[in-house]
Amino acid sequence: MNNVVDIIAGALADDNLIVVVSAVQGVTDLLLDAATRAGSGESGYRRTLEELEQRHLEISQELFSGNIPVTFSVAFSTEFSELKDILHGVFLLRELSDKSLALVLGFGERLSALIVSSYLQERRIEAYYLDARKLIVTDANYADARVDAHASELQIRKQFASFAGVPVVTGFIAAAPDGSATTIGRGGSDYTASILGAALGAAEICIWTDVDGFFSADPKRVRDARILPFISYAEAMELSHAGAKVLHPLAVQPAMKAGIPILIKNSFNPSAEGTRIDGAPLSPERNRSLPVTGLTSINNIVLLNMSGSGMVGVPGIASRLFSCLARHRINIIFISQASSEQSITLAINPAQAPNAKKILEQEFRAEIESRQIDPLAIRKNLAMIAVVGNNMSGHAGVSAQLFETLGKNGVNVIAVAQGANEMNISLVIDSNDEDKALNCIHESFFLSQRKVHLFIAGTGTIARSLIGQIRAHRRNLQEENDLDVVVCGMANTGTIALNDEGIDLDSWQQALQPRSGKRGIEGYMEIIREKNLHNTIFVDCTASKEVAAIYPDLLLANISVVTANKLGMAGSWPLYRSIRDAQRKSNARFLYETNVGAGLPIINTLNDLKNSGDKIISIDGVLSGTLSFIFNELRKGGRFSEIVRRAKEAGYTEPDPRDDLSGADFARKFLILGRELGFTLEFSDVLVESLVPEEYRGEMPVGEFLDRLESVDSWYAEESEKAAADGMTIAYAGGIKDGKASIGVKRVPLSSPIAGLSGSENMVVFTTDRYHATPLVVRGPGAGGEVTAGGVFADILRIASYLV
Ligand SMILES: NC(=O)c1ccc[n+]([C@@H]2O[C@H](COP(=O)([O-])OP(=O)(O)OC[C@H]3O[C@@H](n4cnc5c(N)ncnc54)[C@H](O)[C@@H]3O)[C@@H](O)[C@H]2O)c1
Ligand SMILES: N[C@@H](CCO)C(=O)O
């Protein structure tokens, strides 16, 4: 209130001023509550009334610093006793008519006009209370009255024939021709101001509200929404009708007709520029080079669908449909009819849906009985999004961009409407997808920088390296690729960290908290699905079968997946099939390059060969970083058990090194390659030679297994020596040809490329129709945190470039 008075004092210096006030926040709802209770005979309405009185008294006490002027006190008591009398009458009659309700609801504005005018006087500004019932004339539809513009203009001009002092006018309320109180729609004080300004040819109409102006989208739902300094009348109308609650939808029209600019300003932040709404032509200086100006949503609508073969080519159906709804004062938010004329879809307010269905079924009873028209279908839990902009007109590609971004994010569009003025595309979607849709559309049209949201499973070797790489490279990606990689979730079996804005990657370990609620991977997936963020990628850095089993569900929920875990693509054939099927049905992507050869380009190379028409004859090589390291080190003369320990320390082994030593991990890679080649293979189809002694294959803890492994050191030392004596060496290698894969220990000549491998190097040899005489070889480190995480990161970026 103090800010308001400062603003008024400042503006007064320049010009005559009319102040229009709305009710104190929350008061109209309390009045509605009191009236409804009184109407149903609940004496509890008196408590609400006391609360209302208390709130206004507290405000007044504070404003007048305890010295409430007598004139104010008298006027305040008079207002409240009138309100009490009316509500008492409603209570006794147990009847709340629209007429009484309009009268009751108007007290919010009456009380605040009284407080503001008295406080202005206290601050030595000549001000007076003015009841809008003397100014604005409406029809007798009390609850949502229609303004008679001509009659109102005459009244207003008469009232303001001469100007002295600052009138403080009650917004929202008006009077029917017989003088009884009416209301002009919630938030109607903007409308009151616009009617007054237009009638008097004001220099400007300034709406002081609690936000900085019109935003490109609702800032409560779209974090990156930005203020729009200039918009046209038409855009303001489209945006406010489609749900932008900054301005009353009807407030634009009187100002536009009179050519008066409207300014939206924030009374809590008066120095902010705000938004100017006027009819000036678009220009780049007005920051208006983008095709879309803003987007809005209405988050609870109902779709009514009337369809039937009897509608085709029959004139008058639409007319009856709309007339019937109009007769019952049912407002239509959205209309769509395809050229087949087989169905008309309407969106209406959910509260009116049951009535709408009933009256339309009565209207079309004969057609429904003769099956020319189907029974009316109602669809609930929907939201309507409107994409608005003058510049959209004649600008090809706007709708393509809009639907593409929604499609990639798996947002199903249920109905669409665009008028031929091309400045509003409205679409109806499931209300669960509303925030996601607003964010991805906003990002696509307004921001140069796009986001991908990562949810990582696993916090071990690969995840740690991946986080390190994202942390080191994030700024670069933002600056050079306009891409922001945001890690929103990390979870292992016991702990979890979540932050939609991005977990601080410098201290992610500290962010991990013990998991509560539904645990397991299902619990994590539920969280990810509920968040429903746009451009979400799930990153699997576990070695867990349970995690791999949820890939189909993730993909079907349109969440892309990047995985280092082989237990999906090398899982059972039914799991493999269901991943592939889900991938086909979904718009999300699934990438697993690191499943074979860690960061080496093996799956991509194979697919490039295949897709470009080459025929793969065989694939041979070493596909275990751990086993490669072991045999390369043995060749140098190390001890087997000690080398295995070093492989584990270097991050080459699986969480349980027996997965490597048994050949299982290697076999999975050949299984994956075999399946890529089109063969229906199970794990058991790969012939595997295990290096784990029979007696150590059970449930023995990893530490104990490593200790006992010393027992085989001498065997490996002898085998190596024997081979060396023959100019040979031992290695673990394999191959796949004609759908038959086998892997195991082999003796190879020292001159063979396999004998030349070092460290954890993998080598894959593709023999194909094109690469026949000299096969195509991919060689390089095939295990380790950094190279694998690099491969995972590259897959993430591949998906990001598809998504954004
Ligand atoms: N290390 C490599 O060089 C390499 C190379 C390519 C692929 N991979 C694959 O990467 C994956 C991760 O390897 P790593 O070396 O980081 O293993 P790791 O043992 O260091 O980490 C595994 C992580 O997964 C977590 N985890 C296990 N089950 C889980 C579940 N059900 N839900 C959530 N979290 C779970 C564990 O708590 C741990 O944080 C494995 O599938 C491995 O085959 C590793
Ligand atoms: N443990 C695996 C990691 C790479 O998949 C290996 O040694 O090859």
Image (cartoon, grey):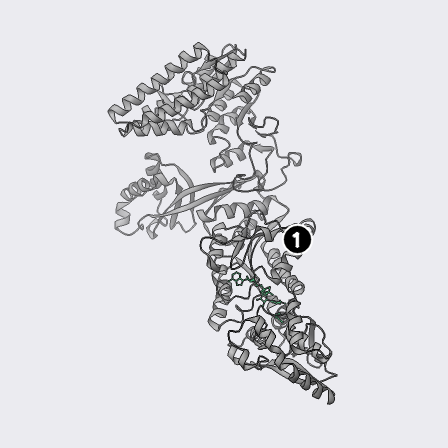
Q: Residue at 59% across / 35% down in the picture?
A: 228
Q: Residue at 56% across / 74% down in the picture?
A: 668
Q: Residue at 43% across / 10% down in the picture?
A: 71
Q: Residue at 49% across / 20% down in the picture?
A: 20
762 relative position to 693: left or right:
right
Q: Quadrant of residue 44?
A: top left
Numbered-mark total: 1
The amino acid beneath tag 1 is: Arg
In the rendered view, would you say 331 is above or below 573? Answer: above
Quarter of the rendered image showing ligand 1 = bottom right
The percent position of residue 396, horizontal first and vertical second, equals: 58, 47
The percent position of residue 793, horizontal first and vertical second, equals: 63, 59
The percent position of residue 301, horizontal first and vertical second, equals: 41, 42
**SS class, disc 1:** helix
Viewer can see residue 430: no
Tell me the crowding category of disc 1: few under 14, some 14 to 19, or many 20 or more residues within 10 angstroms, Cα based.
some
Residue ID for mark 1? 471
Q: Quadrant of residue 262?
A: top right
In the rendered view, would you say 683 is above or below 99? Answer: below
Label 1 near ligand 1 (CB < 8 Å): no
644 relative position to 546: left or right:
right
Viewer can see residue 790: yes
The percent position of residue 380, horizontal first and vertical second, equals: 38, 46
Residue placed most toward the observer, 261 or 719 = 719
Residue placed most toward the observer, 100 or 2 = 2
Residue placed most toward the observer, 209 or 770 = 209
